[in-house]
Image (tube, grey):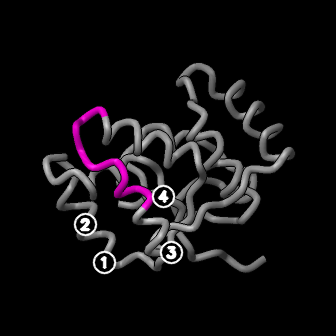
Amino acid sequence: MKRNEQAACDAGPIIAIMDRRDKHHDACVELLKSIILPMVTVWPVLCEAWYILEKRGGQADAVLHWVEARHLRILRINPSDATRMRSLIDQYSDLPMDLADAALVAACEREKIEKVFTLDRRDFSIYRPHHTSHFQILP
């Protein structure tokens, strides 16, 4: 099985890159220079990023600009992913795992993606995807 070098993107880095006031902005912008684009993500991650940026008074529509500019490719969520998401949410109920994380993990499993660009190091270091022993967390 060939390793997929593509990276999945969680909401945290999207928010940090688009909000210059975010304490992780500089580190995420710097790491972005070394990541192969497009990164992949799922709709629940984009919804979370949009919501938080809008709540902070930022330009939430920049999230869609990233999709238009092909920095992000949106992976579909199919019925078997939804089943896996329910299983993951149940398995990690003690964290608890949210919908965006469950969707991203399920899509990464399906696509065999091992790298995740996330600021949620705690949760993503606990998640144990089926296709690998652990995620490689960026940064």
Label 2 or label 3, whichever comes before in sequence order: 2
Q: Which residues are magenta?
A: 55-64
Callout 4: SS: strand
What numbered label is drawn on residue 29?
Answer: 2
Q: Position of residue 57 (x, y in %)?
A: 22, 38
47 sits left or right of 32 in the view: right
Q: Which residue is mark 1?
A: 33
65 sits left or right of 97 in the view: left
Q: Which residue is mark 4?
A: 9
Q: In which quadrant will I find the N terminus?
A: bottom right
Give the alpha-carbon distance from disc 2 to disc 3, as whole Å: 15 Å
Q: Residue at x 57, y 30 (%)?
A: 97
Callout 1: SS: loop
Mark 3 or 1: the one toward you: 3
Of residues 70 and 127, which is closer to you in this image?
A: 70
Q: Position of residue 13 (x, y in %)?
A: 35, 54
Q: Which residue is mark 3?
A: 38
In which image quadrant can residue 8 be found? bottom right
Q: Residue at x 59, y 42 (%)?
A: 127
Q: Is residue 110 above or below residue 69?
A: above
Q: Amino acid at mark 4?
A: Cys
Q: Is residue 93 above or below residue 109?
A: above
* Circle 4 Cα neighbour tier, 10 Å, few/some/many (<14 / 14–19 / ≥20): many
Q: Amino acid at mark 2?
A: Val
